[in-house]
């Protein structure tokens, strides 16, 4: 990839809404992405390899558990700092952001919120430092948008449980040290459990040949009579609301992250449009290309405002699931549209790995589907405003 010349757009001077701490955290993440992610990410994506070298750096910029209290190894930051870190990481690559999102919101969050004190002490510091990487198993081969139909199950054997079933499309699965797995007990109640690599009957085959999110390892979780110690059950919350609570936190981070991908595509296209000369003038001087660029910055600015406000509500514990759905849906669609337009501004160069745009575009095809599809988020908004569920 060519040199990373990224300059973040801030058309409405929104930095003025951020605290000194937000800016410090954001700038540290921004610099780290330029230094450590940009130089290696294109090759990792071309080779479809998760770049393990960045795990330590992700931990150092506070990307693993930004809002988890410091006593458990987290960074103890607020929700806007968490969002800004996700924005900067996804500016580099959605696959890298996915690893950080899963670790923070889908692995550390449930242990922090639903786990026992012993579980928190045992796992959170190692996850925060990157010594452990975790994954989150909710989706099954036959149950994606409707996880309540899951068939993965646990049976109570007196002094332990036995886990059977399979999960699919699981980020970080091929190398994760632990998995937060959602399974039904004999009464049909969804329970969260911590499954450790090395437990007999637990395997994690990798999913190959993805055209999207190629820097993030995806795999299956297969459970064949896995013996789960009773102390590995998350004791404080069960039912579908437990995994959905984790998804709220992760989707909130994705809403910010998508802005990062959009900013990178816009910035790249803007620079290119001023340099590329056709018909004796820069293509940026043509009305058609200006229309694309003007619409991009307008959409980015709207998303920045929406998401900043959501962050304020989240800090006050007032952000609703439906508000988070709206931001995730809006921002990912905004980003994917900007990636497509930006790709066109670069002409043929836009399809190469010289620029990040095509990689962002392909990545966003996963982001628009995972953590609730684009359709499902629309239906959540529909249900919220009408009181009527259209997806059940
Ligand atoms: C790269 C990647 C990483 C992932 N990582 C994880 C992970 O770490 N952990 C995890 O648990 N899962 C993960 N997922 C799975 C992801 O969350 C699911 O793919 C997603 O929830 C959608 O499920 P599905 O693919 O089975 O699609 P389906 O649910 O089969 O949906 C197919 C289509 O039908 C539509 N649809 C479904 N129901 C309705 C309805 N009622 N009304 C209208 N339309 C409907 C959907 O919007 C979609 O367009 C990952 C997926 C990808 C691609």
Image: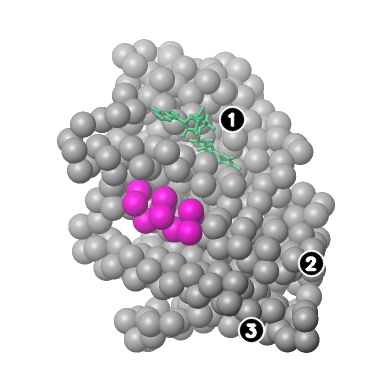
Report, in whole angstroms, how far the alpha carbon at label 2 lies from the one at label 3: 19 Å
Where is residue 336 shown, x and y percent of the image? Answer: 55, 56
Q: Nearer the viewer, mark 3 or mark 1?
A: 3
User: Where is 271 relative to 71, above or below?
Assistant: below
Residue 285: image tag: 3
Mark 2: C-beta under 8 Å from nearest atom of ligand 1? no
Quarter holding the C terminus?
A: top left
What is the span of residues highlighted in magenta in the rendered image?
325-334
Magenta stretch holds residue 315: no
In the rendered structure, find residue 168 and report the number of the disc placed on it: 1
Mark 1 sits near ligand 1, with its Cβ under 8 Å away: yes
**Dominant secondary structure of the residues highlighted in magenta in the image:** helix
Residue 193 vs residue 16, the one in the foreground: 16
Is 330 covered by the magenta stretch? yes
Q: Residue at x 20, y 57 (%)?
A: 318
- Report whether residue 40 is seen: no
Q: Position of residue 290 (x, y in %)?
A: 57, 77
Viewer can see residue 314 = yes
Calculate the distance from the C-alpha at mark 2 to the C-alpha at mark 1.
35 Å
């Amino acid at each position: 990839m060519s040199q990373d010349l990224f300059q973040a757009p801030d058309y409405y001077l929104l930095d003025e809404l951020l605290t000194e701490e937000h800016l410090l955290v954001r700038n540290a993440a921004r610099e780290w992405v330029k230094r450590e992610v940009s130089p290696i990410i294109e090759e990792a994506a071309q080779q479809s390899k998760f770049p393990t070298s960045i795990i330590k750096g992700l931990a150092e910029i506070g990307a693993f558990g930004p809002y988890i209290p410091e006593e458990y190894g987290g960074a103890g930051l607020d929700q806007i700092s968490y969002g800004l870190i996700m924005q900067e990481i996804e500016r580099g690559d959605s696959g890298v952001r996915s690893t950080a999102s899963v670790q923070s919101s889908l692995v550390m969050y449930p242990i922090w919120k639903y786990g026992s004190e012993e579980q928190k002490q045992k796992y959170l510091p190692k996850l925060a430092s990157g010594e452990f990487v975790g994954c989150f198993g909710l989706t099954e081969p036959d149950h994606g948008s409707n996880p309540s139909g899951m068939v993965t199950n646990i049976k109570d054997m007196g002094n332990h449980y036995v886990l059977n079933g399979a999960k699919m499309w699981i980020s970080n699965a091929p190398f994760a040290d632990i998995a937060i797995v959602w399974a039904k007990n004999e009464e049909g109640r969804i329970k969260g459990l911590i499954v450790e690599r090395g437990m007999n009957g637990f395997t994690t085959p990798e999913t190959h040949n993805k055209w999207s999110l190629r820097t993030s390892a995806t795999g299956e979780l297969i459970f064949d009579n896995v013996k789960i110690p009773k102390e590995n059950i998350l004791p404080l919350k069960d039912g579908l609301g437990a995994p959905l609570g984790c998804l709220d936190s992760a989707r909130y981070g994705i809403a910010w992250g998508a802005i990062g991908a959009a900013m990178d595509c816009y910035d790249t296209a803007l620079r290119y449009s001023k340099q590329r000369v056709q018909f004796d003038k820069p293509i940026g001087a043509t009305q058609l290309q200006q229309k694309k660029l003007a619409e991009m910055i307008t959409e980015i600015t709207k998303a920045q405002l929406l998401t900043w406000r959501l962050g304020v509500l989240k800090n006050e514990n007032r952000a609703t699931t439906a508000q988070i759905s709206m931001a995730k849906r809006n921002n990912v669609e905004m980003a994917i549209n900007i990636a497509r337009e930006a790709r066109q501004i670069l002409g043929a160069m836009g399809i190469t790995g010289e620029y990040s745009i095509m990689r962002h575009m392909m990545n966003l095809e996963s982001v628009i589907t995972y953590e609730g599809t684009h359709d499902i988020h629309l239906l959540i908004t529909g249900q919220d405003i009408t009181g009527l569920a259209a997806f059940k």
